[in-house]
Amino acid sequence: MKKLPTIGFALAGVVAIGLTGCGLGSGTSTDSGSSSDEITGEITFSTLQLKPTFTDYIEGVIDDFETANPGTAVKWIDVPFDGAQEKISTDAQAGTLPDVINLNPNFAQPLEAQGAFVNLDDAMPGLSSKFVTGAWDAFQVPGEDGSFGFPWYLSSEVTMYNSSMFETAGLDPNSPPATYDELFADARTLAGAGADFTGMHPALENRFITDLGRMGVPLMNKAGTEWTFNTPDAEAYVAELADLYQSGVFPPDSLTQDHAKETEAYQAGQIALFPSGANFLTIIEENAPDIAKATNVGPQITSEGGPTNVSVMGLLVPKSSENKATALAFAEYITNAENQLAFSKIVTIFPSVTEALADPYFMDDSDGTVESKARRIAAEQLPDAENIVPVQFDDRIKAIVIGKVQLAMKGDLTPAEALDQAVEEANAVTAK
């Protein structure tokens, strides 16, 4: 089984940048950018925690770009996730953002809303047709025209499960759940098997709002100004979560735990089901080879006819850049089909351009490995996937919503009370 490097996909723990209401630095202009200017001179390019694992790849792309465009120079800066929020905030207010900056939609949205980035729909008409629609739409501001980010690498969730535990519980190890009803039924059977494992982990911080979206619950109004998820379907889902927790299908200490603890529980053989990004297969193999041998994969859990979710990383060009032509050209170059396909062969991520996604590499699982199977399943999901979680679901909103759901799962609030209170308090924060 070939090992691939891991990548710190920030979508599992997105952090909103507290820039709402803060003015940007004097370097911000109203220029929408132009792709007709000469491509020359130096630019700065900032990524999120890609060194040192992907240094050779990034530096190779930079060298190729500089060779293809004589007179250009790209200065690469890599920023660790820890402290990225503060650095981007400081740079934005000082007008010193890099010429090309790597952000996820939640990181980018506060600055997009303030008009900090070049509108690609204006600067590069027709560019959107090259990208997976759901990824392109992830860098739009609710209620406003335009899109502001080149989608870069993507992640699509699959359902990992321990096939040995399935057999112990009397379940078909070749029939993973595909819907929420099947997931919860299997989880109850696994928890009731009388073995030393339980069904699954709730990982509320990372899954709850995404699950509602996959179930077709309207999370916000069309303008993106008010939360609307206190619906009967959402009440039924919270009631289901409460029953799963109180009946022991979830581990007893899991109520306040996040995705990292869910990963640890799966690797420790404490839970049988693990819906997550396909890139986590490599982590499981590195940390728990016996669990990896028993692991099989199925499709992303969704409701009948409901959307699948895609996590997106992107590249944005600030209006404050003094060399927008070269910055736009470089962002387009590193996100082209050839370069994204090469990146996807280094680590289990997926390209955002449809030309690269159509490559046979993503559909060939003839080697029989669980990695190639997961890659095929995830790639098949992407053309119709959406970035479900609203960019307004920042740490403040998350704390409110998850806190209320936890109270409902303990029986301290009814599902209706929890959701009504969550919507009311979240709307008060969003309206500020």
Image (tube, rainbow, N blue to C red):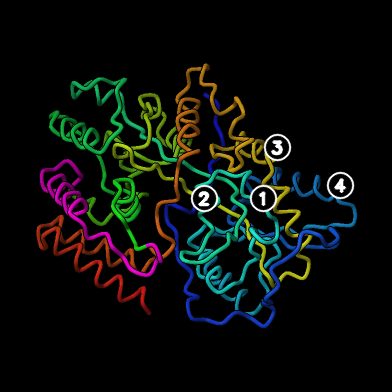
Q: Mark 1 vs mark 4: which is more N-terminal?
A: 4
Kindly identify the amino acid type of the residue bearing the numbered disc 3: Glu
**Is there CB contact under 8 Å for labels 1 and 4?**
no
Would you name the residue on which mark 4 appears? 67
Taking depth in this image into account, of 169 and 101 the one nearest to the observer is 101
Return the x and y of residue 1 as percentages of the image width and height.
Answer: 51, 23
Magenta segment range?
222-251
Would you name the residue on which mark 2 appears? 312
Kindly identify the amino acid type of the residue bearing the numbered disc 1: Gly
Residue at image point 55% right, 43% down: 132
Return the x and y of residue 301 as percentages of the image width and height.
Answer: 33, 38
Q: Secondary structure at mark 3?
A: helix
Vertical placement of residue 113 versus 373, above or below: below
Residue at image point 53% right, 25% down: 363
Q: Is residue 33 magenta?
A: no
Would you name the residue on which mark 1 appears? 126
Residue at image point 62% right, 45% down: 129
